[in-house]
Image (tube, rainbow, N blue to C red):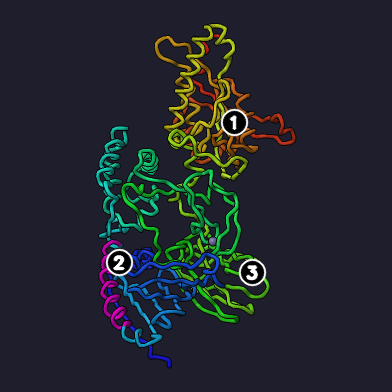
Amino acid sequence: MRLREFHYCWEWYLQSSPQALWPLLADTNRFNYDTGLPSVEQPGADAAVLSNARRRLRLLQLGIAVEWIEEPFEWMQPYRFGVVRRYQRGPVAEMRAQAELTPQAEGGTHLRYQVWVRPQNILGLIAIPLQVGVLSRRSFNVTIQQYDQLALAGKLPLELPARVHFAPGGRQRLVQFCETLVAQGADHDLVTRLATLIERGDDNTLARLRPYALADYWGVSRSAVLELCLLATRAGLLDFRWDLLCPLCRGSQAHSSTLSDIEAHVHCDHCNIDFEVNFDRSVELTFRPNPSIRSISEQEFCIGGPGITPHIVIQQLLQPGERRTVMPMLEEGRYRLRALNWRGHQLLSVSAAGQPEASLGIFGIGWPADEPDVALSPQLTLENKTDREQLLILERMSWSDQAVTATEVTTRQAFRDLFANEALRPGERISVGNLTILFTDLRESTRLYRDIGDASAFGLVMNHFDVLREIIAAEEGAIVKTIGDAVMAVFHRPASALRTALKAQQILSLPENGIRPLYLKAGIHSGPCIAVTLNDRLDYFGSAVNIAARLVGMSTGDDVIISARVYHDPEVAEVLAEWGEQVHAAAVAATLKGFDTERFELWRMTRVALATSEGQRHQR
Ligand SMILES: [Zn+2]
């Protein structure tokens, strides 16, 4: 017997805009957690994923096992999302939920939340009006009002009332570790903020702390928060882990607590693709409290909602031959339309001057090759002309800049000092994207040893390493290795490398109280590199590294040789402006040993003021 369907329609007039509410409401994992719904499980990873992101899920509520197939969530940012669950076990036969956010002329949002539930049996008939009609309605109301207040204040859900479970002795350890951090020189205010977050934050937030997102939210330096998190990990307050992100869904497909456990190839169950891990995109460093302070639950409350993949603005399931019109709100930039189980994609650019309407979709064998330009709020007609169902996905191409990538963190001196053992498994090679490599070498060091004797010369050379180290760390770079008197350092940005080289030359060539001046040869180049482990430490190789190593040989010790790629970086122009007349730039054309066929455009950055005074004091 098919029992009658219950239909609930709840409405709210909220003060925040749909865009402000979307990140909270559409984060269904958080919403289900905040509204007290039970956690869900996937029975066996392989069996759980069905066609087009359908999933087999289950939960336990009041001792009753409930199992269902979840259809893919469908949404259109920031106006609509919904899902259908078809149950195989439990008191319910089918449930559909849909949220619609309509902007109001006077500002604010009309939120309509509808739920349709069909019972499977008498138990369902009795339970649904209580569970959904009374309990969910009440908890949804409380949570939605809280979200509206948060969204209105531009806040993250860090300050929602949370169920907090400290480990035995956890509170005392928190206080103790924070004192240690402050004693080690960490910023008192930042330590207090972090301690408050660990003390009051909910599991959902604390399970994946992202330092840059916290820094942006607190309005403080990203670098300071990242370094605090690293220091706090050393102190035992936090743990870090490397999340491996799929390039398509950008979900965390695996994670590991050390770089040496990272494999170069990973499979994404959701997208059903194998992908190659690289440090600049697919490996993100996140933090969580150490279990000796607070144990953070790993439970999931929703697996496939829009909040899991915030870069996907539209996800729609289209039957063969189906056509559907959507009107999302987009940002300027590039987008990609693809289907989960269909090769290829179509690119789209979005701009204020773009077309107000466009027809998109799979029109036959492949995708159209053009790249239409559409408006910020376009009317898009999606069409599936294939003979099978397709899950169409429209996604933003740009990645969040709030991720601390492995490339970025492993090129920091603080990271390399605190976690010297973090290296790749021997033999593993992982692309790290673009790095800037600085090589330095002391000019005439043989003569130095002869002139002042081995012991004094050695002291001077060691001292020069300290000077370099300090400047490199301050510029957010890291020393990879020293080879004799030479140093190889890496930076995330070219400007930091140039600033380091110029500053180090200046300090070393004009030492205080009669110490012998040193002249530092320097060469800088940027380009893609590969990370490897050499002598138990993280090292880099690739032709970008080889070129940088050649450039240092062309330096006289009063100048820095930089490649055209470094010279033309927009931030390098700022460095040159800072140094003004003190640095003179001149183009040099050269062929490099080992790269004979290529002619390189190089730039010699000569420190003018210094070259003159030095010439008078120290005859070469
Ligand atoms: Zn994926």
Circles 1 and 3, Cβ within 8 Å, touching? The answer is: no
Q: Amino acid at mark 1?
A: Trp
Counting residues from the start of the chain, the first of labels 1 and 3 encountered is: 3
Name which residue lies at 55% across and 77% down: 318
Give how far apart the Cα atoms at labels 1 and 3 are. Answer: 45 Å
What residue is shown with label 2?
A: 16
Q: Amino acid at mark 3?
A: Trp
Q: Amino acid at mark 2?
A: Ser
Query: What secondary structure is marked by label 1?
Result: strand
What span is colored magenta in the figure? 127-150
Instruction: Report if residue 245 is visible in the image.
Output: yes
- Residue matched to label 3: 367
Q: Which percent across, then down, holds residue 209?
A: 38, 51
Above or below: residue 43 compared with residue 485: below
On screen, residue 550 above or below 218: above
Residue drawn at x 64%, y 34% is 601
Q: Which residue of the protein is positioned furthest toward the front in this rendering?
A: 63
Can you tell which mark lies on residue 603? 1
Describe residue 346's horizontal placement relative to residue 609 as left or right. right
Q: Badge 3, how many Cα within 10 Å: few under 14, some, many 20+?
A: some
- Give the mark, 2 or 3, whose residue is nearer the N terminus: 2
> 397 or 264: which is nearer to us?
264
User: Rounded to the nearest whole Å, what is the CA distance between mark 2 and mark 3?
Assistant: 38 Å
Looking at the image, which residue is at 55% across and 19% down? 442
Residue 7 sits above or below residue 419 on the image: below
Asked if 159 appears above or below 455 in the picture, the reply is below
In the rendered structure, the answer to whether residue 565 lies left or right of residue 574 reads right
* Residue 140 covered by magenta stretch: yes
Q: Earlier in the sequence, mark 1 or mark 2?
A: 2
Q: What's the distance in space between the residues labelled 1 and 2, CA to CA? A: 53 Å
Mark number displayed over residue 538 = none
